Amino acid sequence: MSSLPQCPLCSSAFTYEDGGMYVCPECAHEWSQGGEENTDAARIVRDSNGNVLQDGDTVTVIKDLKIKGSSSVLKVGTKVKNIRLIEGDHDIDCKIDGIGAMQLKSEFVKKA
Ligand SMILES: [Zn+2]
C-alpha cells in the first residue's frame, strides 16, 4: 500500500485521493499527484528587485513609508531584521527598532 502524502499546507495526515488530486479534509487544500514536492506553500514573496524573500531575511526599506496610526515615517534605508512572511496585502511581518511590530509590503523593500 502506498501511503498518501501529508497536506503541504497544514500537515494533515488525513489526505485522500479524488479524481487524480489529493485533497485535504482539514484545510480543503487540493493539489495534483506526481507534482513537485512542495514542502511549503507555493507562495513566493519577492522584493522590489525580484529576489525571493524568506523568513529570517534582513531587508532595507526603499521608500519612506507612513506608519499606520502614527505620524512617524519609516525612513528609506531603514534595515529590518528577521522578517516573517505572512499572507495578505502586506506580506511581511516584522519588528523594527524604535517602532515595534509592523507589517510591510514586499514591493517596498529589497533584500539586504
Ligand atoms: Zn491541509
Image (spheres, rainbow, N blue to C red):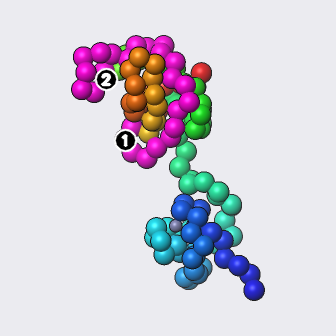
Residue 36, percent from left and from top: 68, 61
Identify the residue at horizontal 53%, vertical 75% (top origin).
23
Query: What residue does disc 2 label?
Result: 67
Residue 15, by quadrant, is: bottom right
Residue type, numbered disc 2: Ile
Looking at the image, is 11 positioned above or below residue 60? below
Query: What residue does disc 1 label?
Result: 89
Looking at the image, is 78 positioned above or below residue 59? above
Residue 75, percent from left and from top: 40, 13
In the picture, the quarter occupied by the C terminus is top right
Mark positioned earlier in the residue sequence (1 or 2) = 2
Q: Is mark 2 within 8 Å of ligand 1?
A: no
Residue 69, percent from left and from top: 24, 26
In the picture, the quarter occupied by the N terminus is bottom right
Marks 1 and 2, how far apart in space?
Answer: 15 Å
Magenta stretch mostly in which secondary structure?
Answer: loop
Is 103 situated left or right of 56 in this image? Answer: left
* Residue 53: in magenta span: no
Q: The residue tagged with tag 1: helix, strand or loop? A: loop
The answer to whether any part of residue 11 appears in the image is yes
Residue type, numbered disc 1: Asp
Identify the residue at horizontal 40%, vertical 30% (top origin).
101
Is 2 situated left or right of 102 in this image? Answer: right
Q: The residue tagged with tag 2: helix, strand or loop? A: loop
Q: Which residues are magenta?
A: 66-90
The answer to whether any part of residue 21 appears in the image is no
Give the foreground label among 1 and 2.
2
The local crowd at label 2, few if under 14, some if 14 to 19, many if 20 or more residues have their Cα within 10 Å, is: some
